[in-house]
Amino acid sequence: LAQVRNAAMLPLHELRDNDGEVFDSVVFMNDILPCVDDLLELIWQSRRQNAGITCAADYMYHDDIGAPVFYDNWVARDINGTALENAPFEQMFHHTESNHR
């Protein structure tokens, strides 16, 4: 996935290096049914929190624990590169500082 992301970013790097064109925000989407409101919320939250990178989080309801759980853990990583847990939000991060945010 990182190779695909880097390939997609290459034209943006070339525009920056050759023409001085700089982009404030870049949005990558892998969903087939994008929601404009969700995309705008993601960009707004990223700017509001002065984040270097922001991502949406997908959840599904887990019958055994009676709560929604994060389910994109196969690809999501914390700041240390550790996979996020398939768990309720407050339990999915291993990085302590990220967990407190």
Image (cartoon, helix red, strand yellow):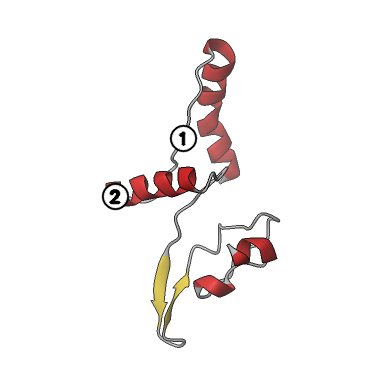
In this view, 94 is above or below 38: below
Question: Which numbered disc covers residue 12?
Answer: none
Dot 1 corresponds to which residue?
25
Foreground of the two, 48 or 13: 48
Which residue: 58% across, 35% down?
Answer: 6
Q: Residue at x 56, y 57 (%)?
A: 75
Of the numbered discs in the image, which one, if any, rests on residue 37?
2
Q: Residue furthest right?
A: 80
Q: Is residue 58 left or right of residue 6?
A: left
Q: Is residue 97 above or below residue 44?
A: below
Q: Is residue 15 left or right of residue 97?
A: left
| Mark 2 crowdedness (10 Å alpha carbons): few <14, some 14-19, many ≥20 | few
Q: Which is more N-terminal, label 1 or label 2? A: 1
Circle 2: residue type: Asp
Q: Is residue 82 visible?
A: yes
Q: Is residue 32 placed above or below 100 in the rendered structure?
A: above
Dot 1: element: loop
Q: Position of residue 32 (x, y in %)?
A: 32, 50
What x and y, as percent, mark residue 22? 51, 22
